[in-house]
Image (cartoon, rainbow, N blue to C red):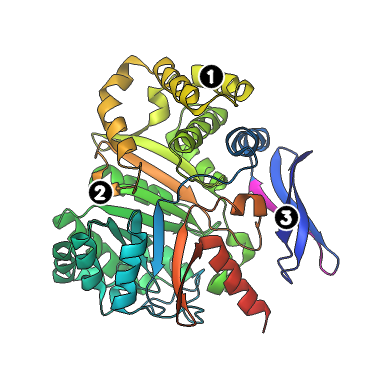
């Protein structure tokens, strides 16, 4: 059954192609046919009907053929060198298509784009000679800043203190496994001890930290549970930001079958932590998309957002604090009256929230409002209440799953220096620029 038509590319030659999302035997695939390389289909979800319903809700009800919503986080690719050079790096710093920025250029970016959160990335940004200057300037300009690091140099607590003193608000640290044997499967085992020491340092300094595991299908799915268990015991972990492995950049040296989509990752977490139906979890994701849509914050269709409540070393899904059956009925009603004025939509949304609330939810009212307010303009993760643990699941688009309708709503702003010019785009554009660079050879 056809769900939606779109545009895509041939994974073998990058030729633009017409494509279709299809529902087949309870699964959703993206299909396309290249005149030279034949038919190719890519699995998007094992939950066919529910995924199709979410796709319809996102594109037909919320977006309604419009591209909208603020991008609240701009990633600055400040340099093109790394001390890990991961075999799975989608950016491919061993063959970079962007250049290192000067301090003056970083200062200009802070001035021009500082109304939203700015994440210093790379390459490995801790290797940039002006890293402390960047965060010091950000603090002086009252810009919310974040560091996205592999964590290797953060094993030095004095380095962490200097970052903290300079004005860093939060750190995002990438991980592959907490077990050397598993980390070795992606070539990261020799860095594990330093990453674990980095986490100890960040905990000691109480620097709000985002665990950012990269998950590979068939290799390290258990790392999801390692991160969840670690976050349940350590409240300095303010969020888990899960990255599905993207078959792009240097990552194309790995098997395409190692790429994993957000809905597949949600399946893994659902089996361990949820007692509701899988349909209920899709209803919750519709609610998250609706919430951010009304707040005019952009979120990709494929991004899944889960929220857990921490207590006594345990994690309990926020869905258990909600009347999901009432939520599903309210969402059905929303679809029937989608074109109401914005003011009435907000009133309906508030009424929906009251309707789905259980008595035990009341104790979470203040933390939920606090987390929502921390997301309105900058996604201030360092202000998240410790009782709540958001888990954001995303997989950057690649030539395997390229869906132009989805890519139009990319939520990750991206700033690079190329040919001596500072340019701003979104993450999907960089991934495809890297792919085109490879195909042109």
Identify which residue is drawn at 27% across, 69% down.
194
Q: CA distance from mark 2 to mark 1?
A: 33 Å
Q: Residue 321, how many percent across, how many down?
A: 37, 23
User: In this rendering, is residue 10 above or below 286?
Assistant: below
Magenta span of residues: 36-44
Query: In this orientation, does residue 149 appear?
Result: no
Quadrant of res 197: bottom left
**Magenta run includes residue 38:** yes
Mark 3, secondary structure of its residue: strand
**Residue 330, disc:** 1
First along the sequence among labels 2 and 1: 1
Mark 1, secondary structure of its residue: helix
Query: In this orientation, does residue 217 appear?
Result: yes
User: Around disc 1, counting alpha carbons within 10 Å, would you say few (fewer than 14), some (14 to 19), or many (20 or more)?
Assistant: some
Which residue was labeled with disc 3? Answer: 7
Viewer-closest of 421 and 392: 421
User: Around disc 2, counting alpha carbons within 10 Å, would you say few (fewer than 14), some (14 to 19), or many (20 or more)?
Assistant: many
* Residue 406 located left or right of residue 163: right
Q: CA distance from mark 1 to mark 3?
A: 33 Å
Quarter of the image that includes the C terminus: bottom right
First along the sequence among labels 3 and 2: 3
Which residue was labeled with disc 2? Answer: 382
Identify which residue is drawn at 57% across, 29% down.
279
Identify which residue is drawn at 39% across, 37% down.
307
Q: Residue 25, how many percent across, how many down?
A: 75, 39
Q: Residue 269, how many percent across, how many down?
A: 46, 41
């Amino acid at each position: 059954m056809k769900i939606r038509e779109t545009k895509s590319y041939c994974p073998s030659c990058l030729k633009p192609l017409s494509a279709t999302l299809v529902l087949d035997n309870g699964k959703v695939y993206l299909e396309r046919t290249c005149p030279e390389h034949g038919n190719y289909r890519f699995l998007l979800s094992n939950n066919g009907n529910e995924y199709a319903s979410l796709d319809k809700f996102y594109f037909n009800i919320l977006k309604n053929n419009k591209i909208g919503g603020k991008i609240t986080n701009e990633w600055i690719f400040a340099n093109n060198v790394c001390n890990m050079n991961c075999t799975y790096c989608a950016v491919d710093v061993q063959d970079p298509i962007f250049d290192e920025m000067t301090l003056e250029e970083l200062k200009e970016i802070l001035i021009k784009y500082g109304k939203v959160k700015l994440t210093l990335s790379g390459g490995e940004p801790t290797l940039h000679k002006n890293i402390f200057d960047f965060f010091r300037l950000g603090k002086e300009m009252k810009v919310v800043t974040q560091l996205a690091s592999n964590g290797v140099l953060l094993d030095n607590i004095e380095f962490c203190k200097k970052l903290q003193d300079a004005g860093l608000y939060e750190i995002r640290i990438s991980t592959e496994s907490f077990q050397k044997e598993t980390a070795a499967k992606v070539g990261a085992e020799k860095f594990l001890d330093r990453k674990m020491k980095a986490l100890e340092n960040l905990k000691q300094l109480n620097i709000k930290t985002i665990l950012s595991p990269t998950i590979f299908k068939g290799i390290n799915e258990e790392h999801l549970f390692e991160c969840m268990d670690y976050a349940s015991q350590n409240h300095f972990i303010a969020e888990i930001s899960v990255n599905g492995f993207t078959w792009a950049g240097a990552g194309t040296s790995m098997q395409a079958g190692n790429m994993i989509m957000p809905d597949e990752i949600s399946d893994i977490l659902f089996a361990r932590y949820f007692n509701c139906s899988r349909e209920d979890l899709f209803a919750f994701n519709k609610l998250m998309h609706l919430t951010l849509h009304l707040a005019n914050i952009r979120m990709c269709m494929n991004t899944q957002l889960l929220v857990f409540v921490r207590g006594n070393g345990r994690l309990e899904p926020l869905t258990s604090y909600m009347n999901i059956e009432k939520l599903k009925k309210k969402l059905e009603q929303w679809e029937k009256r989608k074109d109401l004025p914005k003011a009435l939509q907000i009133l309906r949304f508030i009424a929906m929230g009251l309707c789905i609330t259980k008595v035990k939810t009341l104790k979470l009212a203040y933390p939920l409002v606090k987390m929502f307010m921390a997301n309105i303009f900058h996604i201030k993760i360092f202000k998240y209440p410790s009782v709540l643990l958001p888990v954001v699941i995303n997989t950057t688009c690649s030539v395997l799953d390229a869906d132009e309708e989805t890519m139009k709503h990319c939520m990750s702003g991206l700033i690079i220096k190329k040919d001596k010019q500072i340019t701003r785009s979104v993450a999907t554009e960089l991934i495809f620029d890297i792919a085109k660079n490879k195909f042109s050879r």
